[in-house]
Image (cartoon, grey):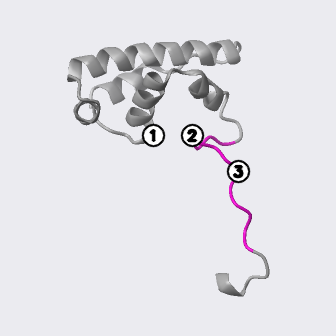
């Protein structure tokens, strides 16, 4: 069946600016609570999957500043997630290191 032949269109997806899904363990809420600066940096790194040098170019800062800001933003995000999910295991630091080395 073609889309034009359907009696009713599919309902629009629920509004979710961060693309979170059921079972996201509070990530959406933690991102919403983050400062605009932290949220932008985290989304560039993990949503847009940009390298440190690409993030530096986008933000007009040095790669060293990206490293420092990203480290601090992850710490603050981790604290928010831990507060929301006190019984969950902490994030795997090796995974973060792999991404930070790009």
Q: In which quadrant is the N terminus drawn? A: bottom right
The answer for how far apart the CA atoms under marks 2 and 1 are is 9 Å
- Determine whether 4 is above or below 21 in the image: below
Q: With respect to residue 70, does 17 lie above or below?
A: below
At 69% from the left edge and 17% from the top edge, which residue is drawn? Answer: 84
Placement of the C terminus among the 4 image quadrants? top left
The residue that mark 3 highlights is 14
The magenta stretch is 9-21
| Residue 63 horizontal side relative to residue 82, left or right | left
Horizontal and vertical percent for residue 100?
Answer: 32, 25
The dot on residue 47 is 1
Circle 1 residues within 10 Å: few <14, some 14–19, many ≥20: few
Which of the 4 quarters of the picture holds residue 78? top right
The reply to whether dot 1 and dot 3 touch (C-beta < 8 Å) is no
- Tell me if residue 25 can be seen: yes
Q: Between marks 1 and 3, how big is the CA–CA gap?
A: 19 Å
Numbered circle sitting on residue 18: 2
């Amino acid at each position: 069946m073609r889309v034009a032949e359907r009696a009713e269109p599919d309902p629009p997806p629920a509004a979710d600016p961060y693309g979170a899904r059921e079972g996201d363990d509070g990530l959406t809420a933690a991102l919403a609570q983050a400062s605009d600066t932290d949220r932008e940096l985290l989304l560039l790194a993990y949503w847009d999957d940009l390298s440190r040098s690409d993030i530096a170019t986008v933000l007009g800062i040095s790669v060293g500043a990206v490293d420092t800001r990203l480290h601090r933003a992850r710490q603050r995000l981790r604290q928010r997630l831990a507060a929301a999910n006190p019984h969950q295991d902490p994030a795997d630091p090796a995974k973060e290191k792999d991404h930070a080395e790009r």
